[in-house]
């Protein structure tokens, strides 16, 4: 199957299959296909089975081979898993402590070449009950719709989103007019699309009319230089061709207020100017040339933000509010601060009310969530810096409370504005909204999101399966040639108040207090290596444990991006000693680890709520386990507390606003015209639809 099949299978759990001309019923072969893919946790819908019944044996064989290869790659079952202790977990739990130590010592002294020699014992067949994931029939326009939705996104895209867009445009340039939406709200998408059109010598159409600010042009220059189009990190600009230099200067020259806009990224513009040579084109692009000259000569350029800051500094709040009315988005972001410093906060609220309708829906949703939780006494305030690396920072929450009536007023203003915005969209009819969506976060910023079997938004809380007795996490990696790489899988346990209890890792292969074990520390992976951790949930809870942070650490300090391959995942196991150590049909999720860091924290378990919190965070230095926020501002405990109390806009609230604006509630899913749920209709995994049609 081609790349299109992989994209549709990964994103929608669908396949596009067309009837054959053979019209031969191959029941035996189809049943064999179904039985074999059941072993990796999947089955096919009736619609696909009906189409397969028209296939020849050769066509069925080709279909099966391609499908199995894709599924195995998605869940990681295309690898060989050979932990140090082949009879894990029972072997580790029962082995003599001194022998575990001796085996590890020999392995370390041999630089990872020598392993303890154990025969793999026969294991009883897997007796766990698992739900099969149904692969459904996709439409012939499904891929087109996905790419169109991604380009129409109102929020930032992940790297895998961008790769899918790039692949599609490079392979189906004739579909450009069909998949490019009338509006591209996200500036980063404009830069990405423009780069692809330039690189592939494709018609630009009216795309360049969307470049309205100097920052838009800067993003394009960054995109052409393969840099970070979010502008969170500086870019080393390439040597542009003359044609590209003229294009960038032309676009810049046609923008308004370029000097003020360029000051925001002054040093980057100076570096870019060294590549564009604007003085060579001063006749054609005089405005751009003058702006570059002012930046280089440090001439004073008054900006909107400097005017607002000066007005606030001198307590001229009337002027500050009048200025902010010109830029409602900036007004919304400064709302909390203005309310706290103004002697008459209702003046701020009423002024904001006049312009709330002009604030973007993404900002309005964030303002609502902020003021809904404004006076909750969380210990920390949590921030996710913009950029391609998934980082989190927390600071002490020292904000004074705001009158609840003011908070309620702001929430009402923003909800009314959103409802009015959503009323402009098509009528939905009867709407069913699953209450479980209150645990899923709206996909606002996916720049740093990792590729996963099931893409989940950071901060979402997903139910652990009720039948889960043991959670088995695993990591697989393969090192580059001639470079030893030691990746370590760890689990750190805390009580309800985030007091450290114990950890399971290469330094502590099994717990002395509850049922948890590590499969053994492997310190080199020339042919691939794997480690596993089993955690018996009830035993941890009985001991007083509530939170468990799962982490992957590259002990040899090679960034994950430089490895041949690295991924982690987890399985829900009812009988951990039955079946193989790695059983594909029990895999709950798998995440590729490709960040430019040495540490990844993919999730946190909350055993009281029986949920796992999707964190997908990357770190450059290992945090200590010391429970002291002042001394450990980027540590494990800080991140745990930050995510456990994280307040972000939820999908339930977003869909509820759409229902109020353009539908009617329906409590019976069978009667609904539009369904928002975990399994049917629009789900949390349909992120392309959510970011383009509902935010």
Image (cartoon, rainbow, N blue to C red):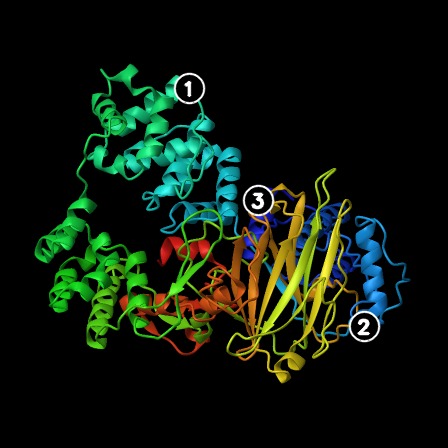
Q: Which residue is mark 2?
A: 90
Q: Position of residue 110 (x, y in %)?
A: 83, 49
544 or 579, which is in the foreground? 544
Q: Is residue 614 left or right of residue 34?
A: left
**Residue 179, position as x, y percentages in the image:** 42, 42
Q: CA distance from mark 3 to mark 1?
A: 33 Å
In this rendering, the answer to whether 589 lies above or below 197 is below
Q: Quadrant of residue 445?
A: bottom left
Q: Earlier in the sequence, mark 3 or mark 1?
A: 3
Q: Is residue 578 visible?
A: no
Report x, y in % for residue 152.
38, 47
How many neighbours does mark 3 have within 10 angstroms: few (below 14), some (14-19), or many (20 or more)? some
The residue tagged 1 is 241
In the picture, which quadrant includes the C terminus? bottom left
- Image quarter hosting the N terminus: top right
Marks 1 and 2 in Cβ contact (< 8 Å): no
Picture residue at 21% right of the left edge, 68% below the top: 410
Q: Nearer the viewer, mark 2 or mark 3?
A: 2
Whether residue 123 sits left or right of residue 212 in the image: it is right
Q: Nearer the viewer, residue 470 or 546?
A: 546
Ranked by sequence position, the earlier of labels 1 and 2 is 2
Q: Secondary structure at mark 1?
A: loop
In the rendering, at what x and y percent does residue 396 appear? 38, 66
Left-right relation of 298 to 612: left
Q: Residue at x 61, y 47 (%)?
A: 560
| Label 1 environment density (alpha carbons within 10 Å; few <14, some 14–19, many ≥20) | few
Residue 404 vertical position relative to residue 525 in the rendered view, above or below: below
Question: Viewer-nearest of labels 3 and 1?
Answer: 1
Q: Is residue 512 left or right of residue 661?
A: right
Which residue is depicted at the point 24% across and 53% down?
A: 329
The residue wearing badge 3 is 4
């Amino acid at each position: 199957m081609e790349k299109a099949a992989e994209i549709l299978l990964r994103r929608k759990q669908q396949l596009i299959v067309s009837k054959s001309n053979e019209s031969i019923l191959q029941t035996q072969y189809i049943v064999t296909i179904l039985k074999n893919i059941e072993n990796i946790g999947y089955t096919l819908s009736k619609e696909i089975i009906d189409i397969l019944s028209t296939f020849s044996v050769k066509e069925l064989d080709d279909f099966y081979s391609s499908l199995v290869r894709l599924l195995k790659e998605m869940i990681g079952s295309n690898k060989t898993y050979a932990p140090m202790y082949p009879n894990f977990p029972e072997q580790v739990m029962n082995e003599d402590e001194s022998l575990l130590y001796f085996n590890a010592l020999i392995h370390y002294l041999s630089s990872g070449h020598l392993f303890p020699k154990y025969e793999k014992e026969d294991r009883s067949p897997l007796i766990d009950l698992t739900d099969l994931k149904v692969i459904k029939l996709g439409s012939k326009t499904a891929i087109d719709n996905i790419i169109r939705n991604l380009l129409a996104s109102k929020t930032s895209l992940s790297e895998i989103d961008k790769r899918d867009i790039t692949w599609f445009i490079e392979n189906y340039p004739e579909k450009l007019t069909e998949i490019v939406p009338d509006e591209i709200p996200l500036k980063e998408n404009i830069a990405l699309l423009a780069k692809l059109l330039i690189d592939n010598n494709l018609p630009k159409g009216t795309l360049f009319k969307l470049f309205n600010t100097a920052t838009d042009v800067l993003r394009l220059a960054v995109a052409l230089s393969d840099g970070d189009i979010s502008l969170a990190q500086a870019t080393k600009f390439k040597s542009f061709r003359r044609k590209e230099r003229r294009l960038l200067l032309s676009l810049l020259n046609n923008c308004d207020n370029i000097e003020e806009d360029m000051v925001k990224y002054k040093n980057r513009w100076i570096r870019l100017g060294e590549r564009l040579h604007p003085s060579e084109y001063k006749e054609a692009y005089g405005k751009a040339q003058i702006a570059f000259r002012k930046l280089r000569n440090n001439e004073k350029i008054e900006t909107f933000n400097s005017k607002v800051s000066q007005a606030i500094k001198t307590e001229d709040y009337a002027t500050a509010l009048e200025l902010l009315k010109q830029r409602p988005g900036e007004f919304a972001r400064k709302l909390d601060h203005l309310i706290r410093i103004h002697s008459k906060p209702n003046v701020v609220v009423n002024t904001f009310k006049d312009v709330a309708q002009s604030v973007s829906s993404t900002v309005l949703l964030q303002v609502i969530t902020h003021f809904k939780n404004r006076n909750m006494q969380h210990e920390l305030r949590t921030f996710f810096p913009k950029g391609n690396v998934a980082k989190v920072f927390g600071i002490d929450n020292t904000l004074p409370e705001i009158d609840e009536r003011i908070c309620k007023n702001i929430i009402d203003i923003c909800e009314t504005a959103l409802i009015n915005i959503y009323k402009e969209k098509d009528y939905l009819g009867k709407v069913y909204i699953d209450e479980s969506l209150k645990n899923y976060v709206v996909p606002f910023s996916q720049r740093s999101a990792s590729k996963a079997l099931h893409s989940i938004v950071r901060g979402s809380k997903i139910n652990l399966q009720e039948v889960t007795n043991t959670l088995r996490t695993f990591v697989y990696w393969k090192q580059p040639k001639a470079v030893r790489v030691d990746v370590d899988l760890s689990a750190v346990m805390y009580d309800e108040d985030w007091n450290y209890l114990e950890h399971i890792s290469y330094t502590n292969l099994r717990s002395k207090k509850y049922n948890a074990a590590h499969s053994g520390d492997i310190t080199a992976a020339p042919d691939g290596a794997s480690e596993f951790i089993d955690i018996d949930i009830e035993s941890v809870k009985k001991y007083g444990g509530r939170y468990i942070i799962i982490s992957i650490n590259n002990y040899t300090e090679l960034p994950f991006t430089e490895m041949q391959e690295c991924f982690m995942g987890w399985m829900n196991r009812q009988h951990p000693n039955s079946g193989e150590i790695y059983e594909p049909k029990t895999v709950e999720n798998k995440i590729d680890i490709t960040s430019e860091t040495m540490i990844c924290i993919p999730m946190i378990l909350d055993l009281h709520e029986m949920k796992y919190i999707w964190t997908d965070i990357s770190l450059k230095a290992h945090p200590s386990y010391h429970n002291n926020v002042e001394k450990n501002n980027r540590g494990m405990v800080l991140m745990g507390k930050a995510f456990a109390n994280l307040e972000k806009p939820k999908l339930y609230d977003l869909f509820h606003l759409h229902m109020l604006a353009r539908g009617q509630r329906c409590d019976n899913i069978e009667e609904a015209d539009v369904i928002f749920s975990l399994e049917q209709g629009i789900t949390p995994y349909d992120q392309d639809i959510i970011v383009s049609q509902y935010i």
